[in-house]
Image: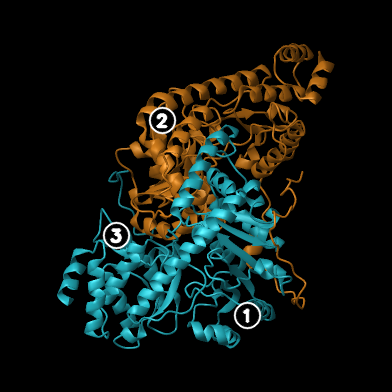
Chain colours: A cyan, B orange
Amino acid sequence: MSGGGGVPARPVPALSARGARIAAGVPGLLDGGFALYVADPFDRERNPEGVVNLGTSENRLCFDLIEERVTLCMIVVVVWLPHSSVLNLNHRGGGVSVKEHLFCFFQITVMNGCCAVFATLSTVLCDPGGDFPWKGTVCSCCILQLQFGVTAVSHCWFFFFQGIRVRVLVLINPNNPLGDIYPAQLLKECLEFAHRHELHVIMDEIYMLSVYDDTTFTSVLSLDSLPDLERTHFMWGFSKDFGMSGIRVGVLYTRNHEIQKAVNQLAVFHSCPGPVQHILTQVLKDRDWLDNVFFPTNKKRLKEAQNLLVDGLADIGIPVLKSSGGLFVWADFRKFLKSQTFEAELELWQKLLDKKLLISPGKAFYCHEPGWFRLVFSDSVDKIYLCKLVLLLIHHVVACKLWKTLALQIMCSNLPIPSQLARALLALV
Amino acid sequence: MIPKQHRGGAIGRGAPRMSGGGGVPARPVPALSARGARIAAGVPGLLDGGFALYVADPFDRERNPEGVVNLGTSENRLCFDLIEERVSVAACRLLCCFLTISKRPGNNLAWRKSSLGLLTVLTAFTRIFPWKGTVCSCCILQLQFGVTAVSHCWFFFFQGIRVRVLVLINPNNPLGDIYPAQLLKECLEFAHRHELHVIMDEIYMLSVYDDTTFTSVLSLDSLPDLERTHFMWGFSKDFGMSGIRVGVLYTRNHEIQKAVNQLAVFHSCPGPVQHILTQVLKDRDWLDNVFFPTNKKRLKEAQNLLVDGLADIGIPVLKSSGGLFVWADFRKFLKSQTFEAELELWQKLLDKKLLISPGKAFYCHEPGWFRLVFSDSVDKIYLCKLVLLLIHHVVACKLWKTLALQIMCSNLPIPSQLARALLALV
């Protein structure tokens, strides 16, 4: 499209005030880091000098299994296409078939991603200007776990005094970024707390099938009764548990009829394509593959990868919070900060990024204490070793002898070591 | 007439469900926000309501011959065989490598979710009220667009509503006609003079079936207001893929791009879908030598069939060149020239299992106009004709009998209730 044919317009703002605010939004830390990775992604053969991504929460460990299973579904799609329901208009909020294999399909809505689910819920539960959903879990781990009741109440009052009315409590279980799991009793206490304060609860269980040790995971769906059924809403998606963050499918399950009606009105703006629904239905129907191949294999690979990263971090004196679920660990880098400030945390983050290692600073998760980082382990072994390598190089306080030992180990391995790191290692050895 | 909602609540196999009853009943605090309550209270429009009835009881030649024949929903099913074959090839080559890559939008041409979602996103930036300036009676709009548009703008201004956006649909929905290049330029100039944004919805741009020259806004040498002209298209109509949910926005306005990109995460297009469609679009040979010519030919044939059929029973249509439908004049069949009579006629047709779209749904200012979609199988067009026959008030009995005989002698699967009614006529 080319311009230049008319009188220059008088300076009327192109966007609405709301549009201008949206346009002015700057990428957050997580998005900013991801953009740098996308611009220069590590690849063993094609870009060994690229950014190693342990920042983005994606599960790439079972890609081989998923690829095979989904490809089989694509062949089935060929058979289904003549029915035309797959390519033509489907039901707003998800076709019957896919919902049937999720839960009680009368009360669920399928949308194009959990972002869409969350945005839609926020739209119908909160009014612009005054209402505020609160993610009650993004605080320092220990304080949250042990003092949740006190912390939550104090936070609510904090917002109230600021004139912000809290309407929704968002709970993420297994937790992001901590990776731990709410004991059943704590979960019930959270729900009771929300009920007393008449808050809606959005239970985000997007990692519910990514529990890799033997801790008992209690889903809200498994509780015999809820304090406030009409205000408890369940959210899940295919992005994490199935490693399909690009398929863009999220699910909302709520028993609140008014919310269902409102959400269904908006679902047309977040539709899930027919072919995608069809493929995922086939995957979900295959209980044999799920129970005997995918889930056990995924659990095993998650555990192995988590062990590898945790041991690697321990070797260089970085403790992590004990975790049982999710795709990441919550690591304690406090001793490496020049000062106990968020500026120092971001400086460390940037230094790692300069060395082509992307991890996620606690500030991005509104952690109240600087020095905590989230590291994602659900990718190839190479990347975990490279992460360790980079961390080595900026390690301020480990004795020189230990550096050399570890450096030797890595030099003797078969890893493709980025050249700049190789040179730095040689200098150490 | 109440559209059927979901079909009941069988619990999925082994799936737990959330159960209440464990706590103190909440004090009566409204569950939804004020905004949420307004959204929840929205009732389905005429088009959605009609579609829901069709979905609940869809005509199928073998499995449900008594079902609702759908000439209401604008979908192109004529080239499904070609698309099926081409998409299957693309699908089989899909390596699933896009499952873990969330495509991030970028550049001027951005992948978005459905056109409807797109319109909403653009509306969000442009304040109160976008105005679809083309949903008026056909002739008046075409010839007097300038006057009509200005008078409409002033109408809204006097009501305290500030118009920010002009939405133009070309080829037009529901009229099916095409803006001549000169008229298009006049519209753009008009918008520029009033500092309106223009959303050019060209979703039917590749569904032009006669030899009328179609001028896309993208082909104009220059635009009066490049920063306020935004182009929209999708795969739903031209490729008959309304279920694939892919719409495209093209704008040169950098601020709008930034804002739209911020919201795009809530309207993402799955990686595998983007990949398949990319393969289809890259195959210029298939597009230029197979799909486009075949689609054009089948659209023209189907349109002729419907137009001739309607003419046989005295229903004229607006001359059209694009889109998947015709704009038909049912005014003489209304009991009175009112929208109540129009809806009564619409309901009567629906009772006879024929779904068409009343002009009221398109904010037509004059009752008696209906949109009929022709881009489906021949059977459905004949059945439409059949139903229209049966409620035809003013055609001479002899003509009824002749046509009824023709249809009885054809090989069409005639729904039993219609067959009985026809036998009574013959």
Mark 1 burial class by Cα count in 10 Å: few <14, some 14-19, many 20+:
some
Report how far apart the C-alphas of labels 1 and 2 lie in the structure.
65 Å
Q: Mark 3 lies on which chain?
A: A
Query: What amino acid does circle 3 point to?
Result: Phe
Give how far across and how far down residue A370 sits, in percent.
Answer: 39, 83
Report how far apart the C-alphas of labels 3 and 1 lie in the structure.
41 Å
Q: Residue drawn at (22%, 73%), measured in percent from left and top?
A: A408
Which quadrant of the rendered structure holds the C terminus of chain A? bottom left
Which residue carries the number 2 mark?
B214
Asked if badge 3 and badge 2 are on a common chain, one would say: no
For the residues labelled 1 and 2, say whether their Cβ atoms are less than 8 Å apart: no
Query: What amino acid does circle 1 point to?
Result: Leu
Left or right: where A50 falls relative to A333 = left
| Residue farthest right in this picture | B424
Q: Quadrant of residue A345?
A: bottom left
Task: Report the front residue among A303 and B249.
Answer: A303
State which tag comes first along the sequence, 3 or 1. Answer: 3
Give how far across and how far down residue B316 sits, in percent.
Answer: 62, 23
In the depicted structure, whether residue A404 falls above or below residue A120: below
Task: Report the front residue among B90 and B83.
Answer: B90
In the depicted structure, whether residue A293 falls above or below residue A348: above
For the residues labelled 3 and 2, say whether their Cβ atoms are less than 8 Å apart: no
Give how far across and how far down residue B213 sits, in percent.
Answer: 40, 27
Report how far apart the C-alphas of labels 3 and 2 lie in the structure.
47 Å
Disc 1 is placed on an element classified as helix
Which residue carries the number 1 mark?
A186
Which quadrant of the rendered structure holds the N terminus of chain A? top left
Give how far across and how far down residue B102 sits, in percent.
Answer: 42, 55
Q: Which mark is residue A42?
A: 3
Query: What amino acid does circle 2 point to?
Result: Phe
